[in-house]
Image (tube, coloured by chain):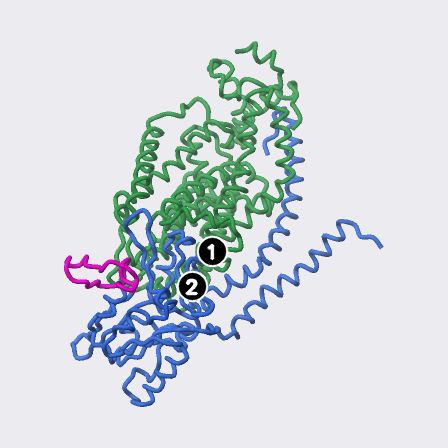
Chain colours: A green, B blue
Amino acid sequence: MSTVTMTSATTSTAAAAIDQTATARWERNVPVYGFPVVNGLFLGLSALVLIAFVLSGYRELAGLGPVSGMNDAYGWGIWKTFNLMVLTALGSGAFAVGIAAWVFRRKRLHSLMRMALLTSFLAYACGLLLLGIDAGRPWNFYWIVFPWRWNMHSPLAEVAICMSIYAMIPLAVENIPPVLERLWYFDSRLRPGVESIEKRLHYFFPWIIAAAYLLPGMHQSSLGALMLLAGERVHPLWQTPWLPVLYLGAATFMSFGCVAGTTMLCCLVWKRAMDMEVLDEAARITSWLIFGWMGLRLLDILFRGALGTAFHFDRFAAVFWLEMVLISIGGLLLCRSLRSHDSQPMFVGYILSSLGGMIYRFSPTTLAFRPNPQALYFPATIEVLVSLGFISLGIVGFLIAVKRFAILPAPLSEWHDMASYFRFRRPYIRWTGYFKYGHFGEDETEASGSD
Amino acid sequence: MSITRRQLFSGIAKAGVPAVVAVTVGTDVLQAGEHIPVPSAAVGLLYDASVCIGCKACVAACAEANDTPPDTRGDALHQAPEDLNDLTRNVIKLYKSEDGSVFSFVKRQCMHCLDPACAAGCPFQALHKDPESGIVKWDADKCIGCRYCTITCPYHIPRFQWMGFNPRVTKCELCKDRLAKGLKPGCTSVCPTGAVIFGPRSVLLLDAKQRIQKSPGRYYQNRVYGEIDNGGTQALYLSKVPFEDLGLPELGPESVPAKTLRWQRRFYQYFALPALLYAGLVQVIRKSLKGHEEEAHQREKETGLRAQL
């Protein structure tokens, strides 16, 4: 990238300051500054992570029986069905928001892309780590490097292989630019190297980004195809040949909810201005996705003649109605927020619809899975602790990343505020990188004079 | 005549689309009409529930033949497992009707399906069907312990070992080591009434049909379970009571994988459709990336701040 000039920057500072009073526009990703990384929440979550690591060590020695509620009938517990199946749906933002931004060219959504990529990477990485702990014989995973040994028609092979490749290559590579950017600002001696890496990265970007949409499309639908083989043991309200499509559809609206909702939450917590234009666009797409998905789901139930079972007085019907009510109220709130440009119903709408989606994704494997009438599954304490620990790992990673890298979108003024914050109020923090060189394009001699 | 690079690529693309459509649509035609082939030397079991006296000699013999310690976890004395588990490949269960007038024993072990759902789902082919004998075998060196087989098997046969750091999947492998030595499987070698017999599948099928012919009306629906059920199995069942009561679900003549993974198999045939989608995506994203980069550089000039891509 070319270096920047100083004169134009100072004028835009003033312009941005005026801008902010009128309507906030997200123009730049800015790290969260002025808040320490280590605080009570961070320490609490780290403790959970530590506990989970110790317990998973115990699991490796003792086996799955002593640490979990899994049994012969319910071979899969929450590690797979919640941490992997549900949370990677929330973490499909890089897929859903990415396709909207890059393939359908919803340009405003580009400001949410870094949030989407980060949340996706963390959700997938934590899910896959836990998958390694959940697998009984993880040392045999090395077969993954021999493609002729794959059973390409197996949905689980598709999921395991595709997910690992996706998280390790396209998703990881897409998350490199914020890191490189930070190195660029950190030390001027690194700049030529960083710039040459960026150039090479940009050359490969079309192939990497395209893989980042193809692979999740494949494995998020294959996650649904997993339960096809279980046949009638999955309750008819859920078991359908359309499971792959519905799983993928749920992942799209849930991940929009996760990305936009998390961004809004961050804006509230760290007092950032919200760009209602971007959020409206995201909410509009989400509401369309939600109603399209609900339509498909209801039509499918209707045509298969399974609607009657929704009116039985049992737990399956209860779960079904809970899911339906949550998603539809969420969708309606999103529609209302589009009319009033109000962020509050939008936020609640995202939360409710995502919760409903989570229940949907959780059902076929667990809530609506009936291997036999006597079978019961309830997660054991250790199982829940490990599951929570790996969720905390993702949140800890998120808290570090947003405070150290330019992830969260903000108005342009925020960037200049950050620069002056580090120049004048925290000049002794040398390692943040963002203050020292290059905000205003000055060279090192000038910058070193200021601290 | 020379062709440019562009022409070459567009030519490949134009030829690729119909090729992919043909592969994706054509796959199903091949598989639907196809009869699931019976392995050349398919062996199997024939279990006649009406002859079984429930002595459980086969349960003990099975454990012995497989070098498994007897499962005495129930009362620490008797080898009386309630169901298949990590020490039990073969179990005798009792079905009793609600009023107690009708009862039947049933021997449960792997059905060795002609198109096994466990092998269809197994990610690295740890569970695989032997191409000659048709025995569904488990390979410890390939199993990652995902337990998908315990979910996919319509008969709920494979069991996972829940204790210990080196868990195994337990299922009947038709005593493949004994067969190699010229011996019969453990269960068939001890059965006092001949309720379970071992042999080539075709011979057993003939035998079963003769039994039905000899005493019509004795067997439920005058039918051999496993002849066509779930695409055909190599363990065949005869019974007086409905098969569903014995835990053998009515799955229809089409195998579970063929029924449920039809679209999955179509879409991933030779990886054609994903490859085409990928090529299309790359083209679209190339164009958007160009526009996006231009905009970013434009903004860089306006704001004086380094572009963020």
Query: Can residue A417 be seen in this snapshot?
Result: no
Asked if residue A334 is positioned above or below residue B212 in the image, the reply reads: above
Identify the mark at residue A222; answer none if there is no mark. 1
Residue at x-position 59% and y-position 34%:
B309
Mark 2 neighbour class, 10 Å CA radius: few under 14, some 14 to 19, many 20 or more: many
User: What residue did someone put label 2 on?
Assistant: A240
Of all residues, the one furthest to the right in this rendering is B1
Name which residue type carries label 1: Ser
| Labelled disc at residue A101 | none
Read off the chain for label 2. Answer: A
Whether label 1 touches label 2, CB < 8 Å: no
Mark toward the start of the polypeptide (1 vs 2):
1
Q: Which residues are magenta?
A: B64-89
Mark 2 is on which residue type? Thr
- Residue drawn at point x = 58 percent, y = 64 percent: B24
Instruction: Classify A98 as above or below A267.
Output: below
Give the SS element for disc 1.
helix
Q: Position of residue A271 (x, y in %)?
A: 43, 28
Residue A304, by quadrant, is bottom left
Closer to us: mark 1 or mark 2?
Answer: 1
Residue A69 locus on image (x, y percent): 27, 50
